[in-house]
Image (cartoon, rainbow, N blue to C red):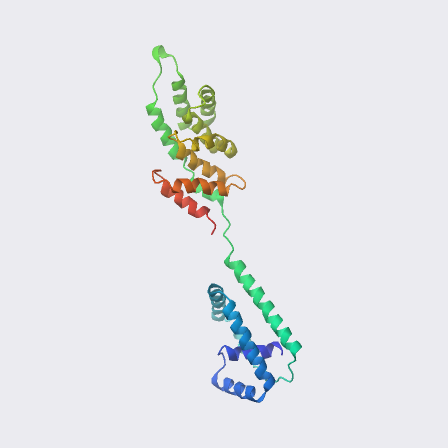
Amino acid sequence: MNEQHIDTIHRYLTGMMDAAEQQAFEAEIQQNPALRREVELERMLLAGIEYAGRNDARKTIESVQTKLRQEGFFDSAQTKPMPTLTIVHSSKVTIMKRILAIAATFIVLAGGVWFFMNQETPLDTNALFTQYYQPKDDIQRAKSIIETLDSYGLAGVQTDTDTLKMALQLYEADKYNEALALLKGFAEIHPENDVAQYYIGVIHISQGRYAKAIEVLLPISRSEESALKNDALWNLGLCYMKTENGVEDARNAFTKLSGDNNYPNHRGAKAVLEQLLPQ
């Protein structure tokens, strides 16, 4: 049975024939046992495919067919006269070949539909980082911390607190290198000071040293005593986006933040998380 004969049978089984053509074809089925067997075989195969196919896959295929039909893709084929159907012989070998051909076609089609339906949109972590990186928040936070720090000590002698204050003022003025030098000096004397460590990490982020920022911010994000814990975790999650294979770590960071209703920006964390989850 050639492709044109198969198409004729499919048109009959799917109700695409007009009344006159259908009547003539049914008359030939009654007179031709070989044709009748082929029609029944095709009917069973199509029913099996329909039963096995998932609804969403069928809908996708149907939508593609509808789109192609609307664009006239099938018009040229439909304008050609259909050949007279004559079937002389249908052996078991021919039937088996036909079954295998339809099965192979269905597997390829189903595989193609699955492939395109399950393609994930590539995650652009650089764009996501740019969208949610908020240096203005850290600048405002620095201003608030500066207001809580004491001024110069007695007799104009500069104290460690004044060093930290000056470092934050330099950071606020975008003088990152000078601020970083003062912060590192302060942190050597006061390694437990989370403010100095936090802004060392923040400056590393601003200068694109994400691995170093992670190294500094990670202990703060795990400290239950630090008021900067969640802010460190936010920046840590962003840094993970800029590292190779860091998406899962970023998801974990924003999962924690989105689940903490006491974190002021937990809704923002949830928005980031939704874009990090597989689509």
Residue 100 location, quadrant: bottom right
Q: Quadrant of the N terminus?
A: bottom right
75 horizontally vs 257: left or right: right
Question: Vertical placement of 154 versus 28: above or below?
Answer: above
Extreme top residue here?
155
Q: Nearer the viewer, residue 180 or 59?
A: 59
47 horizontally vs 157: left or right: right
Question: Vertical placement of 47 versus 251: above or below?
Answer: below
Q: Where in the figure is residue 231, as x and y percent of width and height?
A: 40, 34
Q: Nearer the viewer, residue 4 or 190?
A: 190
Q: Where in the figure is residue 208, as x and y percent of width and height?
A: 50, 34
Which residue is at 42% across, 44% downward? 272
- Residue 129 seen from this side: no
206 horizontally vs 148: left or right: right
Q: Where in the figure is residue 175, as x and y percent of width and height?
A: 44, 26
Numbered marks: total? 0
- Residue 141 seen from this side: yes
82 horizontally vs 264: left or right: right
Which residue is at 35% across, 25% downward? 146
Q: Where in the figure is residue 161, as x and y percent of width and height?
A: 38, 19
